[in-house]
Amino acid sequence: RGPAAGAALAELLRSSRSLELLYLHDNPELGGGLGAALSEVPWANAESRLRELWLNGTGLGPAAGAGLAALLRSSRSLELLYLHDNPELGGGLGAALSEVPWANAESRLRELWLNGTGLGPAAGAG
C-alpha cells in the first residue's frame, strides 16, 4: 500500500524487459505512492514492451500529472492507457495533457480513457 507499493511498482516498470500488460485498476489505496512511481520511471526506455496500463480507480491525484506527462511524451510502446475513475487527477492531469506533443510519430497510443478524472472545461483551453 501507499509509498511502499509505489516504489515496488516503479522498480518493476524500470527493470522489466518483458512486461506488456499491467492491470492495477480498482486499487484506490495505491494513490500517492503510484503517482510518485510514475515520475520515477524512464518511459523512453527503448527496451520497454509495456502496451497496456490500466490505472483506473487507483486513487491517483494531481501529483501524478508529471509522471503521466512523461509517460505520454516518451513511451514508444504504450497503446492503451486507462485513467478513468480517478476524480482527484483534475488539474494535474490537465497540465500533463497540455505538455504532450500529440503529433509524435513514435507514439503508438490508440486509446486514452479520461472519463471521471475531474478534468474541467479549462482542460481543453490553451
Image (cartoon, rainbow, N blue to C red):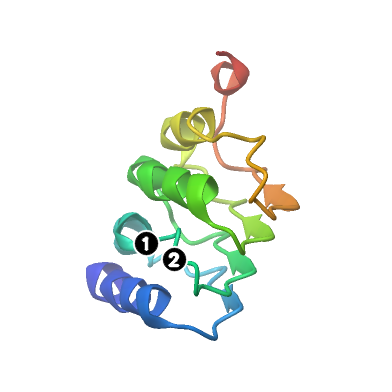
Q: Please tell me whether residue 6 is drawn above or below residue 119 in the rendered image.
A: below
Quadrant of the rendering where the N terminus is positioned? bottom left
Q: Position of residue 81 (x, y in %)?
A: 63, 57
Quadrant of the rendering where the C terminus is positioned? top right
Give, as a three-letter code, the residue at label 1: Pro
Answer with left or right where residue 46 lies relative to residue 116: left
The residue at 58%/75% (across/down) is: 49
Q: How dense is the environment of label 2, judged by Cα within 10 Å: few (below 14), some, or many (20 and up)?
A: some
Q: Position of residue 75 (x, y in %)?
A: 53, 57
The residue at 54%/62% (across/down) is: 55
> Circle 2 — which element?
loop
The residue at 46%/41% (across/down) is: 89
Q: Please tell me whether residue 43 is drawn above or below residue 117 in the rendered image.
A: below
Q: Please tell me whether residue 8 is drawn above or below residue 32 in the rendered image.
A: below
Q: Residue furthest bottom?
A: 18
> Circle 1 — which element?
loop
Task: Identify the disc placed on residue 45.
Answer: 2
Q: Please tell me whether residue 15 is drawn above or below residue 72 in the rendered image.
A: below
Using the numbered discs, state the Cα–Cα distance from disc 2 to disc 1 in whole angstroms.
Answer: 6 Å
Q: Quadrant of residue 6?
A: bottom left
Residue denoted by label 1: 42
Answer with left or right where residue 99 lies relative to residue 117: left
Q: Are the residues tagged 2 and 1 within 8 Å (C-beta)?
A: yes
Q: Quadrant of residue 78?
A: bottom right
Q: How dense is the environment of label 1, judged by Cα within 10 Å: few (below 14), some, or many (20 and up)?
A: some
Closest to the observer: 34 or 70?
70
Closest to the observer: 14 or 59?
14
Give, as a three-letter code, the residue at label 2: Asn
